Amino acid sequence: MVIGLCHLELLLHGNFSLKGKRQVIKSVVERARQRFNISIAEVEDQDLWQKAVLGICTVSNDRQRVNSILDQVVDFIENTNLAEVTDSQIEIMNV
């Protein structure tokens, strides 16, 4: 079993409330979850208006497949133009 984890930091330009942040994050999370069948959630900085940190996880039996899925998710989130990806770290573990 291969587990892939991604730590993704986002910057939300022009956002001035937690309500606005929740709307953007909810949209990004739901779109990514539906498209890629992944586990995704906001994991840090819930009280900051313009910064969000997402944790993403996927499981497969193929290391290349896991890496490909996480790369596609990062690209997808970048291309939504709802938030700027400022940092992404991917870790892949064999269990």
Image: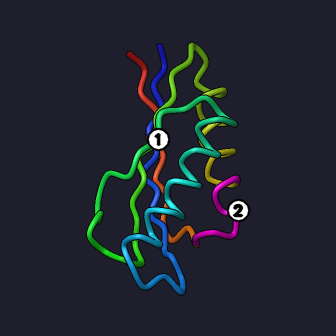
Vertical placement of residue 17 versus 1, above or below: below
Q: Is residue 61 left or right of residue 51?
A: right
Structural crowding at the residue carrying mark 1, measured as other residues with C-alpha within 10 Å and reported as few (<14), some (14–19) or many (≥20)? some
- The residue lying at 42 percent from left, 53 percent from top is 54
Image location (x, y in percent) of residue 4: 48, 32
Give the extent of the magenta segment.
76-83
Image location (x, y in percent) of residue 17: 39, 79
Quadrant where the C terminus is found in the figure: top left
- Residue 68 belongs to the span the image colors magenta: no
> Viewer-proximal residue, 39 or 21?
21
Q: Is residue 71 left or right of residue 1?
A: right
Counting residues from the start of the chain, the first of labels 2 and 1 encountered is 1
> Viewer-proximal residue, 6 or 51?
51
Vertical placement of residue 90 versus 53, above or below: above
Image location (x, y in percent) of residue 73: 63, 46
For label 1, the residue is 40
Q: In the rendered structure, which amino acid carries the disc numbered 2? A: Thr
